Image (cartoon, rainbow, N blue to C red):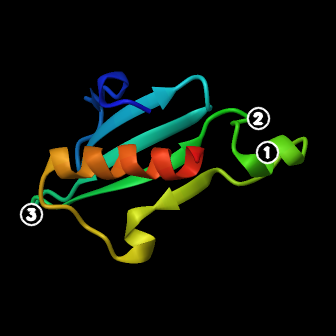
Amino acid sequence: MENDEVKFKKIKKRKILQTWQHKNRKTGLTSFIFCYPNGNYYYFTIVCFIKRCGLKKCVKENCCYERVYYNSLNDYILYKSFDECVEAVINWHKVRDN
């Protein structure tokens, strides 16, 4: 996943947490970036939006029932800037693809 391919679009209907999303139709994964309003901290979540998302687990099995594959809060990771969070998403995809 190249940096040029990753364009996050702000979801305008979200009133509490500012949220941006990027859908990768090749892999079937959606990346969400959320912003805490009080501290300007960002975190991200990777979610599957189709049954066969291209992950190794889904290729081996005909279907998987997991929807959320990764959430940076599970590892207690918060980012101070939006750009830093975008880079973390790109790196997550690079590691997953290799």
Amino acid type at circle 1 is Cys
Between discs 2 and 1, the one toward the N terminus: 2
**Residue at point 90%, 41% (across, down):** 62
Mark 2 and mark 3: span between their CA atoms? 37 Å
| Left or right for 21, reference 19 | right
- Residues packed near mark 2 inside 10 Å, few (<14), some (14 to 19) or many (20 plus): some
**Residue at point 50%, 52% (across, down):** 95
Disc 2 and disc 1 in contact, CB within 8 angstroms = yes
- Residues packed near mark 3 inside 10 Å, few (<14), some (14 to 19) or many (20 plus): few
Q: Find numbered disc 1 in the image and state the secondary structure of the residue it sits on.
A: helix
Q: Quadrant of the N terminus?
A: top left
Q: Find numbered disc 2 in the image and state the secondary structure of the residue it sits on.
A: loop
**Residue at point 20%, 61% (across, down):** 79
Disc 2 and disc 3 in contact, CB within 8 angstroms = no
Disc ID at residue 38: 3
What residue does disc 2 label? 52
Residue 85 picture location, percent across and down: 25, 51
Residue 67 picture location, percent across and down: 64, 50
Between discs 1 and 3, the one toward the N terminus: 3
What residue does disc 1 label? 58
| Left or right for 74, reference 77 | right
Residue 28 picture location, percent across and down: 62, 31
Q: Which residue is at the front of the view, 21 or 54?
A: 54
Amino acid type at circle 2 is Arg
**Residue at point 58%, 44% (across, down):** 97
